[in-house]
Amino acid sequence: MKNNRSRFITLVLILALAFSNPNKIYAEDGYDLWLRYKKIENRDLLKSYQTVLKNVVIRSETSTFNAAKKELKTALPNLLDSEISFSDLNENGGNLIVALRSDSKFISENVNESELKNLGNEGYLIKSLKSNNIVITGNTEVGILYGVFRFLQQIQQEKDISKLEISDFPKTKIRILNHWDNLDRTVERGYAGFSLWDWFRLPDVVDPRYKDYARANASIGINGSVITNVNANALILTPLYLEKIAKLADVFRPYGIKVYLTARFSAPIELDKLPTADPLDPQVQLWWKNKAEEIYKYIPDFGGFLVKANSEGQPGPQNYNRNHAEGANLLADAVAPFGGIVMWRAFVYDQNVPDDRAKQAYTEFKPLDGKFRDNVIVQVKNGAIDFQPREPFHPLFGAMEKSNIMMEFQITQEYLGFSTHLVFLAPLFEECLKADTYAKGEGSTVASSIDGSMHGQKLTGMAGVANIGTDRNWTGHPFAQANWYAFGRLAWDPYLKSAEIADEWIRMTFSNDEKFVQPVLGMMLISRENCVNYMTPLGLHHIMGRSHHHGPGPWVTGGRPDWTAVYYHRADSIGVGFNRTQTGSNATGQYFKPVADKFNNIETCPEEFLLWFHHVPWNYKMKSGNILWDEICYHYNGGVTAVREMQKSWNSLEKSVDSERFNYVQSLLKIQEKEAVWWRNSCILYFQTFSKLPIPEYIEKSDKTLEEYMKIRELYMPGI
Ligand code: GCW
């Protein structure tokens, strides 16, 4: 009896709490990403959605329709806080009709064939009809699935759905994540825990997370996943693993995602003791043909291989005096009968230290243009060095006229503060995609070189080195989720604007409240420039800690020269910066003429790339009127100030966000501030030993000496 009474009191208390503050924001751990499907905040809109969306008609007998239906079933009742009925296509009466045109009389009566003509096999049409019905259709099931996600996003972002007319299709074919995941579940350059792929328990245990991973990717149009590290392990190609991979492929398939693997070039030797891996050796060719056949038995829609060859110690065709095209074509021929492709990376540098590492990829690949098979696509990093906070675009973009070429961005923040710094990467991606290569005159943007519009390539794509791991919130920093999101959106449409992408993401991940959206948008949009300022302003690059790449290390020297910082900044008593002009390494000569001329001339070289291309005297007069030394100090200090501004902004938003994510971001921003100060102080003190000029008065005094900074040793860093 007593027990019952106390239960009753507890219940009353719970109910009272629940109703006392209807706007209470509950703790969230970030697992749901941008697929939170929380009840619509705006009451009028909620009402109008409830009126329009009462019943949904969708087939469920195929796995992709089933996935779409499940998503709608999870999302709509939560977003609309109302019951929604679902019926099969052959029944009538739905006001949201999701179907192929050929399957639905209603759609064929209301949508012209011509409206679907340009959508290809992954596009969709979402249309509100006068009758108040909404249709989601496309030429394929996966196109419709993308349409369903896009439709839900309209609701999540509280948009008017009474006049929808969205017809969209991806501008690139391969939109793919590259996981640098090892078989022992460590992740190279991963800062969000361990690898998602639980090889030990697979194939028997299929973690529900695999499906959520697929949902998140499909929601932004990602259609491929290379699940293993480019620093490859040949074992992944053996039956032991193929059986496990087949399970992952089964989970991803309904979501339109294909599995790809990294191929270790020496696999024939390592796995089957062949005497060679020479791409022109018939035995080697046969080995790869058989291997491909075996893989396709396990995974009939296997996507193909990604290869890092003759780079950082990885084996490749050059070990046998063959070139990259001969290596790529070997694998391409093996997967071609099954419709597979080969993504061959242009990030190459071998044991010989070049006069300028920035030139190597172009030097090796440009002469091979036209020599690759049709099912090979050359995967090029956005810049010629290595995912720096800012790099000029890679000179291979626009230059490969007769070869398929795709973009590789790094989503994981190897050089941008790991998963502890809030850095929204869309502006970095956008800056590169918008850059003008002048390959075919003005307006030949990098984006047009990777979507096939510049040179008419058939195979197109964009890869992103994933920032995902076993952390509950997937990406470590809650805001790093936005980088995964932004990558997917830009792979789908490389012409999108960062502000648009951020706005969508904030609304779905946090809130539609303008008082929250606007300040957060502001923080996100300047965050990458801030990072450049406190790490590597004015074209400085590769001056971070050795090997783990965390924190400043402009003093790093010794060992292989192009792995040191001094190789890249070349500071001396006269000035700082790498002379890559005609009087230096002539890396500028790899760009088309108008671009080369612009970079060559110190007067026209954009200041953000000044020290990338020029060795500039400390007293050089900058556009601001400052001399170079003062300008460097100004940027470093500006970076710190801006992080403090971000902190203020975030602190003012405490009431608009759940305490779990609020507190976590607040703590991470503290780390970011501390590290921005570390970067600023140590870099200024270091470069001062060359410039011998005073540090401007307005900059707070460093509490450590340069020697103290140089002594900092970081142990057991993640991601190595
Ligand atoms: O950025 C560098 C990283 C290496 C990486 C390499 C690459 C996978 O420091 O960890 O190796 O690039 O892109 O191959």
Image (cartoon, grey):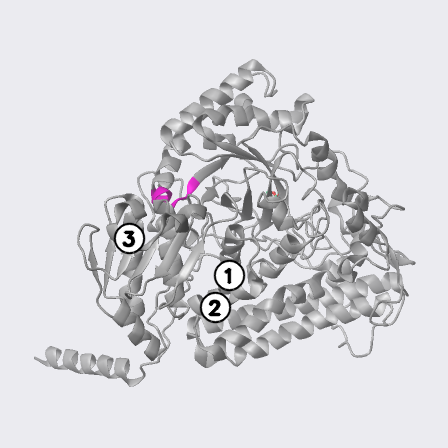
User: Nearer the observer, disc 3 or disc 2?
Assistant: 3
Residue stretch rendered in magenta on the structure: 251-258
Residue extending farthest left: 1
Per the picture, the main secondary structure of the magenta-coloured stretch is: helix
Q: Quadrant of ligand 1?
A: top right
Q: Is residue 265 left or right of residue 240?
A: right
Identity of the amino acid at label 1? Ala
Do labels 2 and 1 touch, CB within 8 Å?
Answer: yes
Label 2: which secondary element: helix
Residue nearer the viewer, 711 or 238: 238
Cα gap from disc 1 to disc 3, whole angstroms:
40 Å
**515 on left or right of 42:** right
Q: Which residue is mark 2?
A: 506
**What residue type is disc 3 on?**
Glu
- In the rendered image, which residue does mark 3 sit on? 109
Q: Mark 2: is the Cβ under 8 angstroms from ligand 1?
A: no
Residues at marks 2 and 1, CA–CA distance in whole angstroms: 8 Å
Q: Amino acid at mark 2?
A: Ile
Direction from residue 387 to residue 633 in the image, left or right: right
261 drawn magenta: no
Residue at coordinates 50% horizontally, 55% vertically from top-left?
A: 489
